[in-house]
Image (cartoon, grey):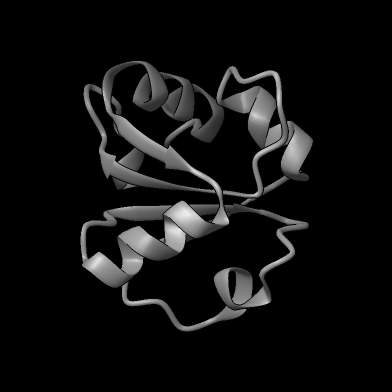
Amino acid sequence: MVDISRALKTAVATGKIRFGIEETKRAIDAGTAKLVIVSENCPDISLRTGELKTKRIVYPGDNAALGAACGKPFSISSLVVLDAGSSDILSA
């Protein structure tokens, strides 16, 4: 089983990640999203519960916890993985 918090930190450091609801939606629309991760309290309900063609994970925590898991000093409601780098996050 993949430790999502550890995999996120590695993906942020070595891969290509975009943060925020609008960036997530753009990547989904463009077909470049490999994985979408949303916080439990993401305000965009379609990202949390909607039918996405892209694999989606609901992070077990709020947006502040997701930001901390990414090593960022700000809250993150959603993020999209474009390239996992050396992370194993895509097998989560």
- Pinpoint residue 62: horizontal percent, then vertical percent: 78, 45
Query: Most extreme residue toward the bottom, as rendered?
Result: 51
For image coordinates 62% across by 26% down, the residue present is: 69
Residue 35 percent coordinates (x, y) = 35, 53
Q: Residue at x 49, y 22 (%)?
A: 6
Relative to 80, 19 lies left or right: right
Quarter that holds the N terminus: top left
Relative to 50, does residue 24 appear above or below in the rendering?
above
Q: Quick check: 50 left or right of 83?
A: right
Tally the numbered discs: 0
Question: Where does residue 90 sit, x and y in percent of width and height?
Answer: 30, 45
- For the question of whether residue 1 can be seen, the reply is no
Q: Residue at x 77, y 34 (%)?
A: 64
Residue at horizontal 55 percent and vertical 25 percent from the top: 70
Left or right position of 86 against 38: left
Instruction: Pinpoint residue 44: horizontal percent, then vertical percent.
Output: 66, 69
**Front-most of residues 14 and 91:** 14
| Residue 9, above or below 60 | above
* Left or right of 37 on screen, residue 87: left
Residue nearest the observer in this picture, 91 or 73: 73
| Residue 41 in view here | yes
Whether 69 is drawn above or below 63: the answer is above
